[in-house]
Amino acid sequence: MYGKEGVAVVDKSYINVGILGWGTVGTGVSKILMNQHALIAKNSGTDLNLKKIVKRTLPATREGVELPADCLTSNPAEVVDNPDIDIVVELIGGVTEAHSLIRRAIQNGKHVVTANKALLAEHGGELFQLASEHQVSLNFEASTAGGIPIIKTLQESFAGNQIHSLYGIVNGTCNYILTEMHEHSVNFSDVLKAAQDMGYAEADPTLDVEGIDAAQKLILLIALAYRSSISLPQLHVEGITNITAQEIQYARELGYVIKLLAIAKLTDGNCVEARVHPTLVPERSLLANVGGAFNAVCVIGDAVGPTLFYGQGAGEMPTASAVVADIIDAAKSVQQGVSAPISQAWLAGGQAEVGFASIDDIETRYYIRFVVADRPGVLAKIGTILGNWQISIASVIQKDPHGMDTVSLVMLTHTAREKNMRAALSQIYALEEVKGEAQLIRIEEEVAF
Ligand code: HSE
């Protein structure tokens, strides 16, 4: 039996699901599939049967989950090569093994669901090409912003919009740390340590605090919003490790909150700015008030205008919620023969529709904090250099003697070109009165709704 475009339609009363990986998210998925079996059947018209779960070390149990006999296995082949399994859910994480298992599952004609942003950010093009050749779906809602349905929103709900810009708080670890720093005036390293002790942050937090996790998610959002792929090395990525309690305090005094934002912005023509960095956002904005480990994505479309999606970006049940929604979509693909959304064409090697701006060419406002000798004429010298590079100062604060004779000199600028800012800074650093490098944080005002 065949549906649209010759895609095979399976006429069966139930659909078998196999899960690779029974960690936190896998446990959540098994709970929903088992505990909400009847509800899912009513909502979707699909009877989903959890057939196999691969767990590397056996035996294993999970509180609140009673699996059918023979469900658990330590052998991935019992899922990816199993002719009875229709949908493979990859939740093992990492790149190498997940990559080869997903390839095998697709080649065996199975629809695939994954939460693996690192894998898709690196190998998305090839995997979507393969899925397209085998006429199966490859769904990835849980890869970005956990329980928030931002992937489906960009693919489907905003399909009639030119996306003007997108601003995401997509890393819960960073947002938790920055929120604690803002609310309790504590240092980055102290909050990170406390977060690790409580299990909120990874033992090795590098991918989170250096902005890599957010960048991988931004790659996926950009692909859907602009039908073009960008690689990690093409993105400008800064993490939050240099943000101090002082920066948080000055930002507050100036009416801003510091957030790690993943930003994509269509500028003139067909050029997109794509960057991840700490950002000053106005304290009255909704994004500024997204606290703790929560995620939020603001999308501004030409027809819809500004929108904001808020929720839990990680964790067992929120992430499982997104995975199960993808499984249900995949089940519809099995039953109705619906192929992958057309908007995934970019991922399958489609023509890029936009180019990407170099960080040198972006234009934005800046927060700058210099540590300078507290002497007459220093402000004038810095102001002259900035002026020579067409950088206009919007406001200045000077206080907090650092020691015998140094102070923090904090400035907000009007919109300036990054290339000019870097050139000006290198001249300013050559001044004998300026001590070390400045703290430079970009400002985004557009999120202010
Ligand atoms: N480590 C991520 C975060 C969650 O802190 O948001 C998984 O993407």
Image (cartoon, helix red, strand yellow):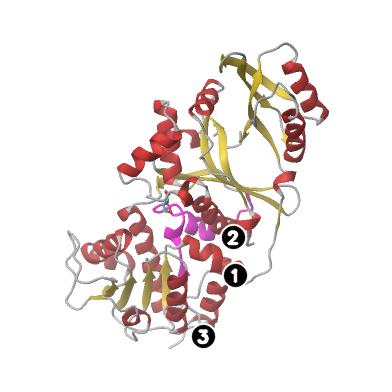
Task: Examine the rendered structure and indicate whether residue 148 appears above or below residue 55.
Answer: above
What is the three-letter code of the residue carrying label 3?
A: Gly
Which quarter of the figure has residue 22? Answer: bottom left
Magenta stretch contains residue 115: no
Distance Cα–Cα, label 2 vs label 3: 27 Å
What is the three-letter code of the residue carrying label 2?
A: Ala
Magenta stretch contains residue 143: yes
Which quarter of the figure has residue 52? Answer: bottom left
Residue 290 visible to the viewer: no
Residue 105 lies, in percent from the top left, at 42, 79
Residue matched to label 2: 223
Distance Cα–Cα, label 1 vs label 2: 10 Å
The magenta region covers: 137-165
Residue matched to label 1: 345
What is the three-letter code of the residue carrying label 1?
A: Ala
Residue 362 lies, in percent from the top left, at 71, 43
Residue 6: mark: 3
Determine the residue positioned at 75% across, 13% down. 377
Among the two numbered marks 2 and 3 on one chain, the one whose residue lies closer to the N terminus: 3
Q: Nearer the viewer, residue 116 or 146?
A: 116
Q: Quadrant of the N terminus?
A: bottom left
Residue 205 lies, in percent from the top left, at 43, 48
Query: Mark 1 falls on what kind of element?
Result: helix
Query: Mark 2 falls on what kind of element?
Result: helix
> Quick one: which residue is furthest to the top in this view?
376
Q: Quadrant of the C terminus?
A: top right
